Amino acid sequence: MPNPKSRTLIHYRHTRSVVRTVIGLWSVVCLLCVVPARAQISDLNIFSPYTMYGIGDLAVGGNAFNRPMGGVGIAIRDPYTFNYRNPASMSVIPRQSAIFNFSGEGKNIYAKNDYTSTTYNTFNIHDLGLAVPLGRGIGLGFSLTPVSSVGYTSRLVYNNPSIDENIGSTIYNYAGDGGISQVAMHFGINVTPQLSLGASMNYWFGNIERQYNSMVTSYLDATVYRSVVSSENQNLSKILFTFGAQYAFKVGQGNALILGVTYQPKTTASIKQTRLTLSYNTTVSDTVYSGSSRWDMDIPAKLAAGVSFQTNKLTVAFDYSRQNWKGAFEIPKDQDITLGLQQDFRLGASYTPNRYDIRNALNRWTYKAGVRYSTSYLSKAGHQLSDAAVSIGVDFGLKKGTFSKVGIGVEYGERGSRAAGQVRERYFNIVAALSLFGKDYWFVRPKYN
């Protein structure tokens, strides 16, 4: 029988091995993050005129497996799915296991106003995550997810009779590209068998590029009499924190009613802005302005709460969140745009007939459906922008008897309206996700005679 010193030495070596493994896995995630993060800010990852302001269109959030359920997750505890929405859920990850998530999202957007219409297709990385247990009831995870997206092009031809009859028309071109991404570290722990607490450290980073061009053209030929070109680059880098809690009530045999809450405190981010403005005509060009500056943008506090009822077959969940962007940043007065309270309502359900059925694979599949509705932080001419969507999806295992799985979901939604000069957007999204569940070979039990 080993003596106490041998036990202590073996325990120390095992703990050190676990720490090295976690650090190594995190390094791999960091390397993997570089490519998708750059992809999110190099090409148009969205196409919407509503991204012309601030940091653009805020992401739905969460992982792709919960997207067909309306994006719920504040009160969900699933030991086989990495849930980014509440760090307290990290405590449910099984020992001697690991979860790796990867997913992509394709979007088809059809936009229309009183004058024109357009369609646009995009494909982007949806999320990337890795979660590992640190002990019984303790979990650690890392994720890369989008925070916001900017992508738009607009062309306006202004006709003024006093100018047209002598010269021609004035053309205004607007374009924007970029977005904000988030690398996060999540930690969760069981304080009691019913109560779990968690915290996330979130690093926001990204660039947003905006371009403006005005041209006075001849109505006789393609001559440009005078043009003004302005290019603006905004860079954001900020660390934020999110705190979460979940409490599970046992309801009958194997059922649970779970309450969840998350809170992100208010903070201020310093935006580095570089601007270049040129003015030129057919023969001469001139630099009107070239320089950089910094300005502060408030990232308002965000409060989210949720409730779920979970059985061995059925999960039903509801989430609500609010974030008041009023006064967060300045918008030119001539834009007729105001900032306000953004609210999100989400309802989703999933059903698995029999996850242990060895004969019928369809009984092992998980079928999902959800709805979501939100009021945006943007209002146009006093009309607040709204967004509503419905979604369905299915998860199926990669191999019988394992928890590794593939998820596919589709979502149809509508944002805005054609009233008050708004643009109505109808979109169709497809998400595809892969989750690899490793067991017994991530952390090896120490053995001795």
Image: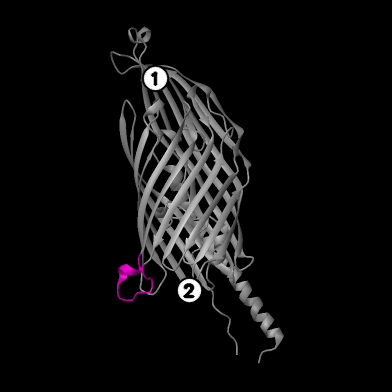
In the rendering, at what x and y percent does residue 330 appear?
56, 29
Name the quadrant containing residue 225: top left
Rendered image: mark on residue 439: 2
Residue 45 visible in the snapshot: no
Q: Residue at x 59, y 62 (%)?
A: 188
Q: How is the image coloured?
A: one colour
- Count of number-bearing discs: 2
Q: Quick one: 4 or 247, which is closer to the camera?
A: 247
Q: Which residue is mark 1?
A: 215
Q: Earlier in the sequence, mark 2 or mark 1?
A: 1
In the rendering, at what x and y percent does residue 77 appear?
51, 62
In the rendering, at what x and y percent does residue 229 appear?
45, 24
Q: Amino acid at mark 1?
A: Met
Q: Amino acid at mark 2?
A: Lys
Q: Main secondary structure of the magenta part?
A: loop
Whether residue 279 sits left or right of residue 187 in the image: it is left
Q: Quick one: 87 or 38, which is closer to the camera?
A: 87
Q: Residue at x 58, y 35 (%)?
A: 328
Q: Residue at x 51, y 28 (%)?
A: 276
**Does 357 lie within the magenta span?**
yes
Q: Quick one: 336 or 52, which is closer to the camera?
A: 336
Whether residue 284 sits left or right of residue 266 in the image: it is left
Start-end of magenta stretch: 353-365
Dot 1 crowding, Cα within 10 Å, few <14, some 14–19, many 20+: many
Name the quadrant containing residue 325: top right
